[in-house]
Structures are given as structure tokens and as C-alpha cells.
Amino acid sequence: MSIFEYNGSAVVAMVGKNCFAIASDRRLGVNLQTIATDFQRIFKIHDKLYIGLSGLATDVQTLYQRLIFRHKLYQLREERDMKPQTFASLVSAILYEKRFGPYFCQPVIAGLGDDDVPFICTMDCIGAKELAKDFVVSGTASESLYGACESMYKPNMEPEELFETISQALLSSVDRDCLSGWGGHVLLVTSTEVQERTLKGRMD
């Protein structure tokens, strides 16, 4: 079993019309044993920028703390929030720096840039970026997430429809993966508000 599959995870981000949604499962396990059912994988960087970290839970928390530290330094120096594209480059650089003993994480970055244009990207554990215009996925349930998102996604969805689509994609995908699941956590971000919702899924 790969170290990336040790704790199990599922993270997905999807783009709508001047908005985006990012969602994750809530399970923390050790191989097939479930340890917790309220584990946080999506973290706020600032009001319009979020990161979801799939992979090894200890590295998820360590990497998040490093990213918050670097973003606060940027805010002090520049007196503004980081743009999503800049933040993606920062994450990539931090991961590549540790390429010979990497953080076992696969980040999903989602944010609203200039003129509220949504930006999403994912990368592997050494920081190779993959940009997308529709959706990105990572985690142990990524294969079934790709299938569900491919069939459910359509461009320029309004926020409420986007929430429904990403929720259904996440729930149907984690049911096909025994290492992730136990409900979901969805953040829907528009230019004016952030909605945070918890999904109830199969508890097995």
C-alpha cells in the first residue's frame, strides 16, 4: 500500500460562474481502520483562497502550518492578500524544495483571482502543477471522482447548482472507495460570500 493511501482521502474542486466549490471527505483512517470521522482537509488561506490537502494526515497539518506562515509573511511585506496563481507557485516551490524527502501530500488549490475569475489547480507531491478550467481531483478516490465529475460537470453553473453537482460527485465517488468517505465537507465561494456545508454520507 502506498504511503498516500495510508490515511485515505478524497478532495475535489470545481469551477462555476464567478464562483468555485471545494469539497473533501471527513474520514481519517489507518489503512482500513477508521480513527476519526471529522478530519479537516480543506483550509482557508484568505477569504477567496482555499487549499485542500489529500495524502498523509501528519504531512497535511505540517504543510498547512508552513503555508499559513509563508502567507502571513507575504501579507506583512506586501500589505495585500496573495493571488491564487502566486499561491500555487509558492506551494509548488515549497514542495519541490523537499523533493528528496517529500511531503506526502497532493494539494488542490482553489481561489478567486482578479475580476472574480475562478482559478483551480492541483499538483503532485513534488510540486508539478496541473491547471484546469473545469475541475481537479486528488486522493485515494481520485479515479472515481474523475468519472463522476466528467459526467456531471457543465460550464458556467450558478452557485447552488455547483454545490449540488460537487456534492453528488463526491458522495457517489467515495462510496466506491473503501479508504475515504464518512460524509463530506463542502465550501462554496462567491465574490460576496462563503457557504460552508457538511454532507451526511454512508457511515461504513
Image (cartoon, grey):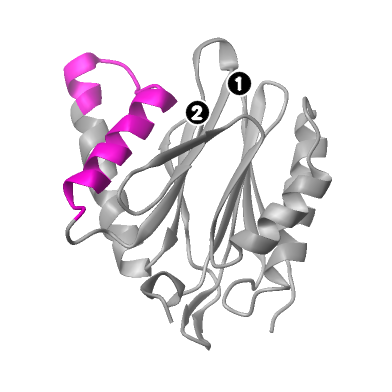
Question: Contact (CB < 8 A) between labels 2 and 1?
Answer: yes
Residue sitting nearer the eye, 60 or 100:
100
Badge 1 element: loop
Find out whether residue 96 is within the magenta segment: yes
Name the residue type under label 2: Lys
Q: Magenta residues?
A: 74-99
Find out whether residue 93 is within the magenta segment: yes
| Above-or-below relation of 128 to 73 | below
Q: Which residue does the image show at 37% across and 68% down from the upper left?
A: 56
Q: Which residue does the image show at 71% across and 29% down from the upper left?
A: 16
Q: Which residue does the image show at 30% across and 63% down from the upper left?
A: 59
Q: Is residue 167 left or right of residue 7?
A: right
Rendering coords of residue 174 (x, y %) = 68, 68
- The local crowd at label 1, few if under 14, some if 14 to 19, many if 20 or more residues have their Cα within 10 Å, is some
Q: Is residue 96 left or right of residue 181?
A: left
Q: Is residue 166 left or right of residue 128?
A: right
- The residue at which mark 2 appears reads as 48
Inspect this view and state whether residue 90 appears. Answer: yes
Name the residue type under label 1: Ser
| Above-or-below relation of 76 to 12 | above
Rendering coords of residue 162 (x, y %) = 76, 38
Inspect this view and state whether residue 188 appears. Answer: no
Residue 142 placement: quadrant: bottom right
Mark number for residue 191? 1
Badge 2 element: loop
Rendering coords of residue 30 (x, y %) = 44, 84
Q: Which residue does the image show at 34% across and 54% down from the upper left?
A: 125
